[in-house]
């Protein structure tokens, strides 16, 4: 099956605290290697005519400035945790310059959190200059944003359902520590997969790097990149040398052509 060519940009690859972490003096947090500096996890998916951002982190404004993004067509949310939604207010700049509302796709759980967190966006009487969004519910059904086909993948973040997304040959999963077999079948056949790999030590709601590697091998993914990385994982260049040939750590600014 042929898929639309896409460009994937990693806007951030860090965990909820980012890297460096405030007040930490570990070797990762004081590293001079730019690949050890990680904003909160997010990607941008682009075709020739459509631009989608997955999650608006607390770093969203800087991520957009750093990549010189002038327009987005939609935002997809994976789940309602603060490090994935906190930057939504900054879409108002796109509203102003592009003179259009932004389509925002989220499941019911995340919609509820957005309406609480950004109550003023959904108020009956709106204050001038607030974000202008169209909130659209995601189910488990495949849907289109512009010319990009998207298949939601339900994963578990301890007890919270989180949405991963498959875009053609590319699958993106963050904040997961369990994926049911039926959902794994949606990933099979991907040429590239991104999955969270928080650290070496077991975590209650995230895959470790060994668990992420095992998942890649189980699903027979030709190329995988790890994201949502904490400073506890270790130095980018050191850890990369220990990984299997088909695996690598993602880093902020990395672009993939799929």
Image: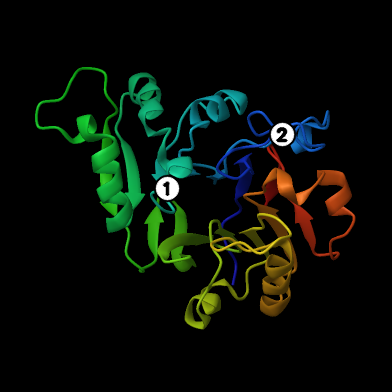
Point out the image quarter for the C terminus. bottom right
Q: Is residue 131 left or right of residue 35?
A: left
Q: Position of residue 81 (x, y in %)?
A: 42, 47
Q: Residues within 10 Å of mark 2 (few under 14, many from 20)?
A: many
Question: Residue under circle 2?
Answer: 37
* Quarter of the figure with residue 20: top right
Q: Is residue 222 above or below residue 175?
A: below
Q: In the rendered structure, which disc, 2 or 1, sits on the residue that comes first in sequence?
A: 2
CB contact under 8 Å: marks 2 and 1: no
- Whether 66 is drawn above or below 203: the answer is above
x, y (%) of residue 243? 84, 61
Q: CA distance from mark 2 to mark 1?
A: 21 Å
Pick whichever, 6 or 175, lies toward us: 175
Q: From the viewer's perspective, tell me whether residue 35 is left or right of residue 206.
A: right
Element type at marker 1?
Answer: loop
Task: Identify the residue at horizontal 53%, vertical 73% (top origin).
Answer: 179
Q: Which residue is mark 1?
A: 81
The picture places residue 9, in percent across and down from the top left corner, at 63, 42
Residue located farthest toward the bottom when viewing the structure as drawn = 181
In this picture the colour scheme is rainbow
Q: Looking at the image, which residue is at 61% across and 35% down?
A: 39
Seen in the image, is 56 located left or right of residue 232? Answer: left
Q: Compared with residue 114, is residue 98 higher up or lower down, i.e. above or below?
A: above
From the viewer's side, name the closer residue of 13 and 191.
Answer: 13
Can see residue 134?
A: no
Q: Residue at x 37, y 61 (%)?
A: 143
Q: Position of residue 229 (x, y in %)?
A: 67, 49
């Amino acid at each position: 099956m042929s898929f639309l060519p896409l460009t994937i940009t990693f806007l951030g690859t860090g965990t909820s605290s980012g890297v460096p972490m405030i007040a930490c003096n570990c070797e990762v947090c004081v590293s001079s290697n730019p690949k050890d500096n990680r904003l909160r996890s997010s990607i941008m998916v682009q075709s020739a005519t459509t631009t989608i951002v997955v999650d608006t982190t607390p770093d969203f404004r800087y991520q957009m400035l750093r990549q010189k993004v002038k327009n987005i067509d939609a935002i997809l949310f994976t789940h309602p945790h603060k490090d994935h939604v906190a930057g939504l207010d900054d879409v108002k700049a796109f509203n102003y310059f592009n003179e259009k509302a932004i389509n925002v796709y989220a499941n019911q759980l995340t919609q509820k959190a957005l309406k609480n967190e950004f109550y003023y966006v959904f108020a009956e009487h709106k204050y001038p200059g607030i974000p202008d969004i169209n909130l659209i519910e995601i189910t488990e059904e495949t849907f289109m944003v512009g010319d990009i086909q998207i298949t939601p993948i339900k994963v578990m973040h301890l007890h919270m359902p989180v949405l991963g997304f498959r875009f053609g040959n590319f699958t993106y999963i963050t904040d997961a520590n369990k994926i049911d077999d039926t959902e794994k079948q949606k990933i099979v056949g991907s040429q590239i997969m991104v999955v969270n790999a928080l650290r070496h030590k077991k975590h209650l709601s995230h895959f470790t790097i060994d668990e992420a590697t095992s998942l890649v091998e189980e699903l027979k993914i030709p190329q995988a990149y790890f994201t949502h990385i904490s400073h506890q994982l270790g130095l980018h260049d050191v850890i990369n040398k220990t990984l299997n040939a088909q695996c690598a750590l993602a880093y902020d600014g990395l672009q993939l052509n799929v």
